Image: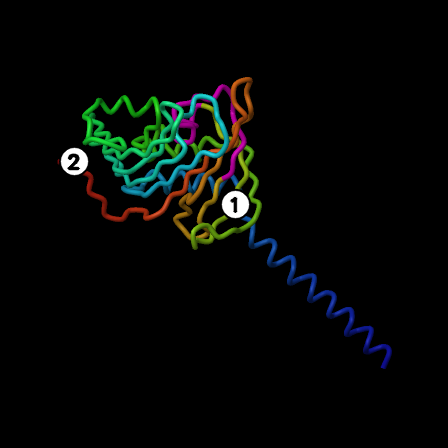
Amino acid sequence: MIRWLGVLLVLAAVTGTAGCDSDSGSAQPDGAQLLQRSADAMRQVETVRFDLKVDGKISGISISSAQGQLTKAGNVKGTAVITATGQPAETEFVIVGDTLYLKGPTGGFQKLPSSVAASVYDPTKILDANLGLAALVAGSTEPVVQGKETVDGVEAYRVRAKFAKNNLGVLLPGAGASTDLPGELWITTAEPNRPVKATVSVPATSSAAGGTVTIRLSEYDNPVTVTPPS
């Protein structure tokens, strides 16, 4: 009886160990390969909804949030909260081609060159293959897959990485980066492995406390029509 009890205990231990190894091995893809697949997927995207949020006080950034829809052609419609004179104000914006239509809390739309948006935040670059999120993902280094999380109802791999300073324009509105910065990406576990969230951490400076910038992406390739406001 003692002999058979010992055999059963050994079998149970072996079975339990094998199950744990199988689960952990299948849960973590290679970080570099995952980033490459995600960057390739972003280059194929035609439309997307974005939601940008700034937490903390970051030097050179006057926007606290922005959300909207955009097309690969660079046409965008959405809203943003901007602090221009010490008080936050919600604005509505439309960008079609080289023209920015901007509407503040009062009055109608003003017609301006689209280049004006770059000094605050230029969402037209999000789907740009060379300057947007595809470039940010492809240029990320030191990726470490930390596990799985659910982002807005979508299962995603959470990846810690370092973002190249030259690719941070889509995450740091109106502020340049003098060095590579740490961040995280959430990439869907299901193919085509598109990013659904990205966060970058900005250190404190002599004039600002620092903080984080987060962008969420959804509604990939849904129909989007952007026309000049009447």
Mark 2: which amino acid?
Answer: Pro
Quarter of the image where the C terminus is located: top left
Which residue is depicted at the point 20% across and 27% down?
110
Q: Report whether 160 appears left or right of 91.
A: right
Task: Compute the Cα span from label 1 to label 2.
Answer: 39 Å
Quarter of the image where the N terminus is located: bottom right
Residue with the mark numbered 2: 229
Q: Magenta segment: does it hold 141?
A: no
Q: Quick check: marks 1 and 2 in contact, CB under 8 Å?
A: no
Numbered label attached to residue 158: 1
Mark whose residue sits in front, 1 or 2:
2
Q: Secondary structure at mark 1?
A: strand
Q: Report whether 24 appears left or right of 185.
A: right
Q: Is residue 10 above or below residue 87?
A: below
Please report the bounds of the magenta region as a residue range: 166-184
Q: Position of residue 39 (x, y in %)?
A: 40, 38
Q: Nearer the viewer, residue 82 or 152?
A: 82
Q: Write down the quadrant of residue 135 in the picture.
A: top left
Q: Position of residue 151 (x, y in %)?
A: 46, 50
